[in-house]
Amino acid sequence: MSVKGETPRATEETIDAVLRPQKWEEYIGQERVKKNLKVIIEAAKKRKENPDHLLFYGSPGLGKTTLAYLIAKELKTNIRITAGPMIEKPGDLAALLTNLSEGDILFIDEIHRLSKTCEELIYPAMEDFKLHLMAGRGVMARTIELKLPKFTLIGATTRIALLSSPLRSRFGATFQLNFYTKEDIKKIIGRSAKILGVEITEKAVEFISERCRFTPRVANRLLKRLRDFAQIEGNGIIDKQIAILGFEAMGIDKLGLEEADRKILRAIIQKFNGGPVGIQALAATVGEEIDTILEIYEPYLLQLGLLKRTQRGRIATDLAYTHLGISSKNSQMSF
Ligand code: ADP
């Protein structure tokens, strides 16, 4: 349910902001990443230098932006947040970089979507804190070199494979964020429920933790939806009964799959006889963007072992057949 005038995306951003961990202790899980980052930050502080440029990759909602905020807080520095698609022209990037102050953090989300020209401009900015701009046209064209304040770039991407190797190699450290463990997700749900001021039973926490794609943003979104169900259908408390009711209404099954996930699996099984099928054909069949399948649905299906990626395309595993209740590889159920 979105507030009047707000898009679902805006609502999600508001929940993100309200529930975003403000201290390291509140950032649950991803222990190896946190440990390494703390070393990088402490060392930089001791040397009174900026930390290296950092790159985070992993599925949406796993905590990349939150880490960038925490690093800025720890360094007591400003952070500027932007995203690859928002930096359209070299002038956009130049404006961003020249407006930074010494020690600032520049966070570029979806950095794989930075245009080629902007990417080339960012190399010397990352390496030598210099900006090479073209002035004039034709024979009068010349390059102007601008000195930039020393900043730290934090890049985030859901598609590390799309990052060119020259860009990747300019980051001092790269961290992969993994799906969370069930125990960590339980802690996140407990913390978020407290902040939202909603009572939740232990059994409900357990139930939700198995159905939220092991992703904090999804856990928070579902918690907020269930709070509505508890208010309308119950006595305001989220218990297992409310959770069952809510998940059924939202079409989320016991593995946390939504209708779109099941549609993808059913398409592979029923239209392509279990696969292998290429991503383009699959996307066209289910009516989704290729990027949406690659970034949102596929990582979780792979993680659960319902889908396999081979050189020749995607294959639905036996587990997928069992989960959907389809027995034979040649069955043609209604689609
Ligand atoms: P990403 O940038 O990877 O898409 P975000 O950093 O925006 O993800 O995280 C989405 C939301 O999930 C945050 O607002 C926060 O509430 C929650 N979250 C993410 N990681 C954690 C964590 N480790 N502990 C607690 N909450 C988290």
Image (cartoon, helix red, strand yellow):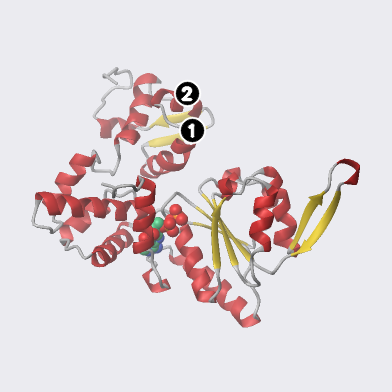
Is label 2 in a helix, a strand or a loop? helix
On the image, the x and y values in percent for residue 324 come to: 26, 31
For label 1, the SS is helix
Q: Is residue 42 visible?
A: yes
| In the image, farthest residue toward the left | 235
Dot placed on the residue nearer the N-terminal end, 1 or 2:
2
Whether 25 is drawn above or below 248: the answer is: below
Question: Which residue does the image show at 66% across and 76% down from the upper left?
Answer: 49
Asked if residue 169 can be seen in this view, the reply is no
Residue tagged by mark 1? 290
For the C terminus, the image quarter is top left
Q: Quadrant of ligand 1?
A: bottom left
State the image coordinates of residue 289 (x, y, percent, origin top left).
46, 32
Residue 173: percent from the left, percent from the top?
Answer: 60, 62
- Residue 147 lies, in percent from the top left, at 76, 65
Residue hosting label 2: 281
